[in-house]
Structures are given as C-alpha cells and as structure tokens.
Amino acid sequence: MKLLSLTRYYFNKHLYSTCSVKEILKSQPEGCKKKLKGWAKAMRKMKENIFIDLDDGSTHHRLQVVIPKNKVPASLTYGCSFEAIGVLVKNPSNKLELIAESINVHGPCVVQDGYPFAPRKTYNPDYVRQHLHIRPRTATFGCLLRLRNKMSTAVRNRFSNDNFVEINVPVLSSNDCEGAGEVFVVKPNNDSLIKEMISQNHHSLLETFFNGQTYLTVSGQLHLECMARALTKVYTLGPTFRAENSKSRLHLSEFYMIEAEQAFIDRTEELLGMIEKTTSTVVEKLLEESEDEIDHYRKMIGASEDNNPVNLLKVPYEVITYHKACDILERENCFKNAMIRGKPLTKEHELFLVKYNGQKPIFVVDWPKELKPFYTKTVPSNKALVSAVDLLCPNVGELCGGSVREDNHDILKEKLSLVGMEDKLDWYIELRKFGNVSTAGFGIGFERFLQVLLDIQNIKDTIAFPRWPHNCKM
Amino acid sequence: MKLLSLTRYYFNKHLYSTCSVKEILKSQPEGCKKKLKGWAKAMRKMKENIFIDLDDGSTHHRLQVVIPKNKVPASLTYGCSFEAIGVLVKNPSNKLELIAESINVHGPCVVQDGYPFAPRKTYNPDYVRQHLHIRPRTATFGCLLRLRNKMSTAVRNRFSNDNFVEINVPVLSSNDCEGAGEVFVVKPNNDSLIKEMISQNHHSLLETFFNGQTYLTVSGQLHLECMARALTKVYTLGPTFRAENSKSRLHLSEFYMIEAEQAFIDRTEELLGMIEKTTSTVVEKLLEESEDEIDHYRKMIGASEDNNPVNLLKVPYEVITYHKACDILERENCFKNAMIRGKPLTKEHELFLVKYNGQKPIFVVDWPKELKPFYTKTVPSNKALVSAVDLLCPNVGELCGGSVREDNHDILKEKLSLVGMEDKLDWYIELRKFGNVSTAGFGIGFERFLQVLLDIQNIKDTIAFPRWPHNCKM
C-alpha cells in the first residue's frame, strides 16, 4: 500500500550530525575539510588572524579556529554560537586546529546586554549558581555534567555486569518509609478535579486523587526488598526527596540515590563487600576512562590533594564498630559537639574518623539498635546492636548506609506494631510470610559520591537543577 | 596507622555470590558441583524422585532440580525459597539439571495461608495486579521486569553511542511546562515546619517551602533546551507525572519518558531521523540480545502477530501531513467519533492510520498551530502550520511527539505574553538572547514503547508499581 505523501528530500542527509570536537580529537582527520558548530569561548586577535576557542560541549577540550581578520563577522564575539568551515591542520604544538574559510554566526552574544559571564573572568560557584540556565556553558559546569553522566553509566555497568536488574521504584508512594526524614505530600493542582473525584469515603483533599495520602519517596528500599524476593539482585538509581529545612553543603531537597538489594545475604561482611565493590569499581572505571577530564575539573575548582579518589580503590576498606569509634572519639575529645555514646555521630565526628584513617574510606558497623530504623536486623550475638553499616568518606562523611534486613515475620510485625505502622506496611510484612529469604542492601547518595570523587564543596554544584529550601528555580 | 578493630573473617568469601541460573546456562559447567538458591515454581513427583523447577529471577529459564523423595524436606512446596547442592548433569533432552544431594528450605510457602497464586493455574493481569508485592514472582511479570531493564539499557546505549549526554532533569519544577496536562503540586507534610519557614512574603502554604508553587514535572523538555545550548546533544530517561482522571489502558499518573534535544537542527526531516534512529536502534538491539525472552513473553500473554516489532526496524518510516491524514480519515468516515479537521486525532483515528499503513509506524507532520504548544516553530512556507510531529504505532497510537522549537526571541516572547507566561519563563526566553541556536527534540513514552514491542494491552502491566487515579498501592 502506498500512502507516502511527503517526499523526504533530506533523507540521505538527515542522519548527518554536526562533526563534534570529541570525534575530531578521536579520529584526528588531519587535512580534511569539516564543518564545526559550537560556542566561542575565548578569542585572541593577532596581527592578521583571529583565534577562537570553539566549545561544542562534547568534551572539555576546545578546538582552535583560525580565520583571517577580514573574514570575521562583526557579531562573532565571546559567547556567540557559530559554525565554521575549513581544513584541519596541526599547529606547531601538534594540536589540530581548523583553518576556517568562512564563519557564520548563529546567535550573537552581547555581554553588555546582561550576559552573566564576561571573557577571561572567573566566578565563584555561588555567583555562577544564580544563573542556572547559563551555568552549563561554563567550563567547570560543562565538565561536571559530562562526568555526572559518566558516573551514572559506570554505576549501571557495575550492577548489570553483576546481573543486577534495575528497577524503577516509584516516586509516588503511599508510605513515608522509614521515618528517615520529613516528607513531601502531593495533590492535583486542579481543585475542581479533586471535587469531581471526591468519593463517599470522606477523603480529605490530600487523599482524594489516590484514595490516601501520597508522598514523594525518601527511599526505594522497601520496594527493592519486594523485588529481591523475585529477582534475587536488584538496584535503582533515581530521585529521592526530603522536606527538611537544611541548607547545608551536603543536603538537597531532591537528590539521587543508588540503592541495591540482594537476596540470600545475611551477614554484615557480605554487605560490606557489595558496598566496596560498588564504590571501587565505579571509581576505577571513571579513572580509567576519564582521568584527563577528572584532573582538569579538579584543577579548575582547586580540589585538595588530601581527598584523593585513588583511596577509594584500596579494598578492603577498614572496619570499626560503633563503640570502638566512640572510644577513639572520647579519647580525642576536641569537638565542637562532644560525642555522646548512644547518640548519632555528627559530621565533625565522621570526618575526624576518616582523617584518623588516613583520609581513606572507613566502615562503621554494629550500631545501637536505637540509632537505626525498624527494618535492621539484630546482631545475633548482642541484642542491643543491629547489623547496620555506615561508610564514611573524605569531604562528606557518611556516603553510604546499609543493613541486613529483619527477615523474621513475627519480630518485624511486632516492631512495626510498636510504631503503629503495622497496617500501612502489611505488604512489607507479608513478604516474610511466603517464600521468604534474607536480604541486605545499601543506599549511596549519588551527589555525595560525586563530591568525594571530585572534592566538590557544595552539593548544589553536583546537579543540573539543585532544589533546596526557598530555592526551586526553573 | 592501624585502627582495624574488626577482623573481616569472611573477606575472602564475602564477594562470593550465589551461582545464578543465568550463569550456569551461559557457562554450561557440566559435571560441576554447585549451590543454587531460588524459588520452587513447579514440582513433579515421580516414582523415586521429585523434580523441582528452580527460578532465581536471573533469567526466564528455570533449572530443573532432581532429588530422591526421601531427601525432600516437608516444607519444600510450590512458592517456597530453598537452596540445593548437587552436581550438574545433562538430561536426555540435553538440558542441564541439578542432581541434588541436599535441599534446605529458607522460607516455606503455604498457599492455603493466603498466597494469591496456586500451582498450575494462570490468572488474568487484572487479578495479578491486585497483588503488586507478589506479582514480580510470576513468570510473566519477572520477564517484563528484565525486559524493561534491557530496554532502558538499550535506550541509554543508543544515545551515549551517539555522544548524547544524559541529564537528570528535575522532578520538582517551578513551571507547569506546556499546559500539556493537569499537574500535581507538592508541599511538606509537616505543617509546623511550614509555619516555621513562613516568611514576610505572605506565601501560601503551598508556596512556603520553595518560595513559590512547586509542581511535579510533566516534561523535561524546557530544561533540556537549556542544556542543548551548552552540550549540543542531551537526553533524559526519567519519571514524569500527570494529575489526570484517566483510567485508560494507555495512561498512568507516574510514567517514564525518553526525551532528547539536539542543537543546530532546524528541519522536521532531521528530527524524524533522530526519532526513527532511536526506535529502530533500540528494537534492533533488543531483538538481537533478547529475542528468546521477548518471544517467550509474547507467547505467555498471547501477543498478536499483527503487531510485530520487526516493523519498527524498517526505516525510513512513512510520513504523512496532518491534512493528508485528515483526507484519508474523511474518506473512510467509519469512526465512533468523526474526524473534525482542525481538531486533534482520536486514538481510533491514530490506530486506523497505523492499520492503513500496514501496521507499520507512521509520522504525522505539519500540524495546525492551534493543536500544538507555544514552543513549536512555524513552518516557513505556511504560517498556519507548525514543525511538529507525532509518531503513530500499533497498539498505542501516539508513541512519540516532537517538534522543531521556536528559536526566535521576539516571537517566543510574544507567544508567551499572550498566555501570560512571559514572567514565569523568563529564563526560557533568555536562552534565545545569548549565543542562541536552533534546537529540535522529542519525547517517547517509555511504557508505551514497551507496549508496542511486547503488544501489552494495559500500560499498568509495564511498570513495577503503577499509579493511576484512586490507586497508589505500596
């Protein structure tokens, strides 16, 4: 049957994509004529020629475009977008550059009209962050976005190489999980829709749409536990939310978590292996594939040598129990907030332990049960402790938390009924009733992982569109 | 410095992972002694032995475990979890099976105690979906979860092979985007936190936390347009939300979208190439790597031969203009709801056009501007039309929508001021002021893509935890 009614004149050409700087640096097509498109990031006027750094975002490298002064359009200025046609030749320092025969400006950029960045100036991250929509065009943040993408690829590869199945856990959830923090609730914006939907069940406005209050997820763990009881090994990498009034350099209202859960695991030691395999494999892959860009980025932001990502490769990591850690902290006793045994460690305590360990990652295990959520399993040899672990790292302190989960149906039911959550989590309890298995798992803050790798001070500079109290721009 | 305080007795063993059925079928370790762990999915009692199908979720294949009757624990029943130790041998039909010397039941399963599935019974999807937490253990849904994971991997590979950078667009957004549908709003659940945070700005309760009303994203497109103006090629694969009171077999309140945006593209034809390269590359990869599991799944759900995924490989797809499509639909005139020129196509019209095209995908281009959002670019030769495209496919109708974006600063500003959104989207307009480029992009409904590939009738059966009006379980 013929119904073709629009001839696709361009079909042979329509898969044509702009030749990127990355491709050119890879294939080194010296002597070839090419068309390049990107943004002018630096310009140097010499006697006869103008030298322009072209950045197309495909790599942190820029390609130098050379063109005679008389062929330069007036609108070719810092920040403009343009295309250049010319021949690629090697310059005296053996780098490819484009000797352009023509340049065509797509979109001019008049800095005086309010462009937030001027040529040859550096700005501090707080200023740059005020211009979220232009921030990706800065050298620093362009790098960050590419490296963030590479990290998520490395995370997914680490798990799929080990036969974990990625699960899209829900953002909308009828449970507020572990009481791990304040939650957001959602409702339709359209009040007349809500009125239309209200049933005889006397739901409140917040309960109408979904027949119950609905929260933004704070963790996919409980959902992953359900999946591990069918697929054995599962993980997720997605957004999670906290409605906390914290503006610290380590917290966001919307952030990403790597969470993994594995069935048939019932010992803390196996869990530690899962965690350090994740951090070390991911960092190893990143250093292998992107060392150049990582170094470039770290140099631009003035990263400290103290926090060296190579330290994450050295497995096995040191392990210390909560109480031994307390012994050390008590001995030191040099903190703004003194350590109180039986209470959580503060950021200051965490960072001290990392420093004490030579700026290398360290696991803290065997926590008092009062400090960890209901789902953590009691240590067989000591009923006051649970099989939970925190992994502490340079720059951020806690990077990862995990535990062996309580898999005894009756114990879990009792724990949940004590906190009045027995009915809400009936499905979670029932997982232990049929074909039950032990499981263990962990969660790594994805942005904090970037902070450790790249020594980024403020978590708001690790994500394209940061959200924190009083701030949800764009 | 030595602070190691917990000996890791198990370190040499702790990376030991259960030998999975998938690994065994791949490496075929005939004659080897292995330990396997999983769930009993079918049991056949013969004279001397019992034959058990072990399913560990790593593959759709099950491994047959054979054990003498006298060695079988009483608790080994359908649905239980167990481990078996034995030697792998080839059976008469040349398949590996485990001749077990011992079996140890981890978690029993007493069907009479309320397990929703009984052995040797099949259930319709509506029933299975009522037991979301046990659903992953069914053969059908286990397959779906693995195939969903494989599709997201294939999507990410298609883009990263072509140097697109994945961007995590925000779930929380201060704009409700394109007016594409009803939106959800969010607020902290804790009212005393809100009171604490209320400023002198007289924000309402819904505006306090973020200093403005905050929505769940309906599309990452506008954010991707910002990124394409720095990195040239960007994409995202993440959750999006609609607060619509629709319970159709094609809609969810929370669903995933593949969205891509590319700079320096200004022709519909190039956009069509981007789209069909995505659908055809992903399907090609899936058929190459998972044809066996796809066939198995399609057979289990009784998929129609009419909807054959091979049709998605045949690029270029046919193209028809909106008005030519109307001509055909007018001629036919056999619809429940008649086609009205100038109005949107209904699902019935869409599916008719696909059928008319031999059940192959078809692009509909050149839409009346009234039918598409503000950001679509006018067709140069006809001011009444815009450069927008819908891709129609078997089973679902619209799978994908895309457009060349309006890149003219003044035209866009005028369009937005007409709908009163000029102030809210000032950043979006400003993208066109500095170093502007043309961009084009598209969005593919990820779950609908699975519906097309696997011929799944109800979208609720494509996602682990479906959310729709009155339903947000777990």
Image: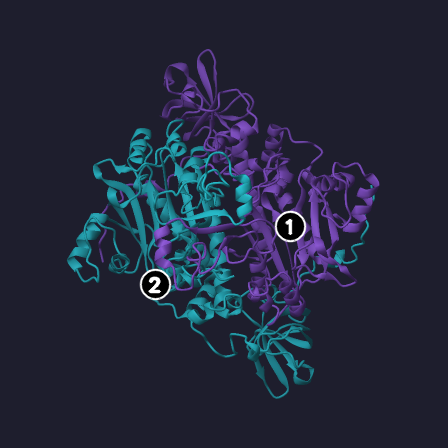
Chain colours: A cyan, B purple
**Residue A446 position in % (x across, y down):** 42, 54
Q: Is residue B277 visible?
A: no
Q: Chain of mark 2?
A: A
Separation of residues labelled 1 and 2 (CA atoms) = 40 Å
Q: Quadrant of residue B378?
A: bottom right
Residue displayed at 23% across by 46% down: B6
Going by the picture, which residue comes out furthest to the left?
A331
Q: Amino acid at mark 1?
A: Thr
Residue A450: x and y, percent? 42, 58
Q: Is residue A109 above or below residue B367?
A: below
Report which residue position mark 2 lands on.
A307
Q: Which residue is mark 1?
A: B278
Residue A8: tell me if it is visible.
yes
For label 1, the SS is helix
Residue at 41% x, 30% y is B37
Q: x, y (%) of residue A452? A: 37, 59
Badge nearest the viewer, 1 or 2 = 1
Q: Nearer the viewer, residue A170 or A95?
A: A170
Q: Nearer the viewer, residue B272 or A175?
A: A175
- Work out whether B249 lies above or below A140: above
How crowded is the residue under tag 2: few (<14 C-alpha within 10 Å), some, or many (20+)?
many
Q: Amino acid at mark 2?
A: Asn
Quick one: SS at disc 2? loop
- The answer for which chain carries disc 1 is B
Asked if labels 1 and 2 share a chain, the reply is no
Q: Is residue A290 left or right of residue A75?
A: left
Spot occupied by residue B433 in the image (x, y as percentages of width and height): 61, 71
- Pick whichever, A137 or A163, lies toward us: A137
* Circle 1 crowding by C-alpha within 10 Å: few under 14, some 14–19, many from 20: some
**Camera-side residue: B161 or A6?**
A6
Q: How many marks?
A: 2
Q: Quadrant of the image for the N terminus of chain B? A: bottom left
